[in-house]
Image: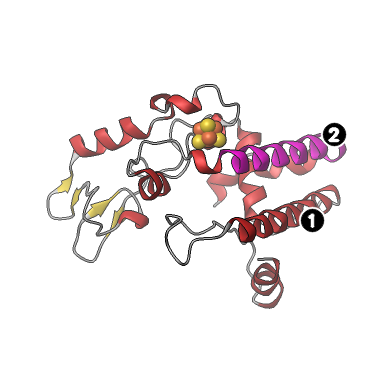
Amino acid sequence: MIRIYRHLKDELGFHEIGFAPVTASNQQSYSISAADMESVIAQFHALAEEWLAFALRGEMHGFSNVSETIGELVQGVNKSHPCGAGLGLLGVGPSGDLAPCHRFVDADSHSLGHISTGIDRDKRTHFLTKGHVGAKYDCQTCWARPLCAGGCHHEAFVRYGDTGHANLHYCDWIRDWTDTCLRIYGAVSVQNPAFLRRFAERRALS
Ligand code: SF4
């Protein structure tokens, strides 16, 4: 992962690079094994350490998995849903079907309408009601829920057959990553607080 990061950042010149481990049931041959996931997590942490060192020097590092979370912390985000699927974005398939996001496009289920007829508001309401963090029993006592909100709808569907299920298979990872970003936020707040100002408008600028 770090090798890919260096290639995209240093050789191709991208401003920011983020990573999302592939969504798959653990029966799929391309799913990430536990050992490989440990390696991925270790590399997430290595890049996070670099991000902090850059921030303390007042420089932007390009690892957006940290930048996004720091932006959310600075803005005081408290999510009702894990992402904008069905809220601020839809996926549109070649057939014209509307889906909650690109991951559901032209799947047999979860159509939220068609470009010829518009958004099916009842289906959209059903999807969003199921996906609300308040509907996920396991998340109610979790301190990470303002940022996680139960995790990816599509991953929940692939793993549990239900877009409204909490992604319990990665809670430990989410809480560990959130803790890492909170520590970075705390360190930068104390040692270089002016640096955090640039994240206040991050969404508006992107
Ligand atoms: S980490 Fe797990 S329990 Fe906590 S909000 Fe996310 S899915 Fe829910």
Q: Magenta span has 84?
A: no
Q: Is residue 8 left or right of residue 196?
A: left
Q: Which residue occupies 55% across, 30% down?
A: 146
Q: Where residue 50 is drawn, which disc sits there?
A: 1
The vertical placement of 183 against 139, above or below, is below
Which residues are the magenta region? 171-192
Residue 39 placement: quadrant: bottom right
Disc 1 crowd rating (10 Å Cα; few below 14, some 14-19, many 20+) is: few
- Kindly tell me whether residue 70 is visible in this rendering: no
Using the numbered discs, state the Cα–Cα distance from disc 2 to disc 1 in whole angstroms. 18 Å
Q: Is residue 155 left or right of residue 123?
A: right
The answer to whether the beta carbon of the residue marked 1 is less than 8 Å from any atom of ligand 1 is no
- Kindly tell me whether residue 49 is visible in this rendering: yes
Q: Which residue is mark 2?
A: 190
The vertical placement of 23 against 148, above or below, is below
Q: Give the percent coordinates (x, y) of residue 97.
A: 20, 56
